[in-house]
Amino acid sequence: INADKVLVSGFSCPRAGGDARAVFCCGFQDVKYCCDDPHSFFPYEHSYMWWLSVGALVGLSIAAVVLFAFIITVCVLCYLFISTKPRSKLDTGLSLQM
């Protein structure tokens, strides 16, 4: 079944009447085709995949900045909490005499 929900009949590579060098089955579940490159998984130009990579890098960069800001905020709040505590000595209940 392809992306349009149409049943696609099975085929083997190379197809009859097709390129004899296209012996590999390439593509994804919804777009299958015969090709001559065993590493060709996508029937689009490489620039399309490059933009996917750029989008992933931008998303990961934003996530890293947000995580870094969160960690810095937690560190600052911990420092402020510790530094603003009153500095009273603990009362042990015993008075020491010499």
Image (spheres, grey):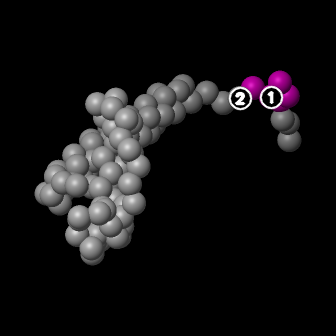
Q: Tell me if label 1 and label 2 are in contact, CB under 8 Å.
A: yes
Identify the residue at image location x=18%, y=54%.
Answer: 44
Say if the magenta span includes residue 93: yes
Per the rendered image, the range of residues in magenta is 91-95
Q: Is residue 80 visible to the viewer in this orientation of the structure?
A: no
What x and y, as percent, mark residue 87? Answer: 56, 30
Asked which secondary structure carries label 1, the reply is loop
Q: Is residue 25 visible to the viewer in this orientation of the structure?
A: yes
Which dot marks residue 92?
1
Residue 98: quadrant of the picture: top right
Residue 64: quadrant of the picture: top left
What x and y, as percent, mark residue 57? Answer: 26, 51
Say if the magenta span includes residue 31: no
**Label 2 neighbour load within 10 Å: few <14, some 14-19, many 20+:** few
> Would residue 91 be found to the left or right of residue 88 on screen?
right
What x and y, as percent, mark residue 95? Answer: 83, 29
Asked which secondary structure carries label 2, the reply is loop
Foreground residue, 97 or 3? 3
Foreground residue, 61 or 95? 61
Q: Give the residue furthest to the bottom.
A: 21
What's the amino acid at mark 1?
Answer: Thr
Which dot marks residue 90?
2
Foreground residue, 35 or 50? 35
Q: Give the residue furthest to the front.
A: 17
Establish if 45 lies above or below 74. Answer: below
What x and y, as percent, mark residue 28? Answer: 36, 49
What's the amino acid at mark 2?
Answer: Leu
Q: Residues under labels 1 and 2: Cα distance? A: 6 Å
Identify the residue at image location x=71%, y=29%.
Answer: 90
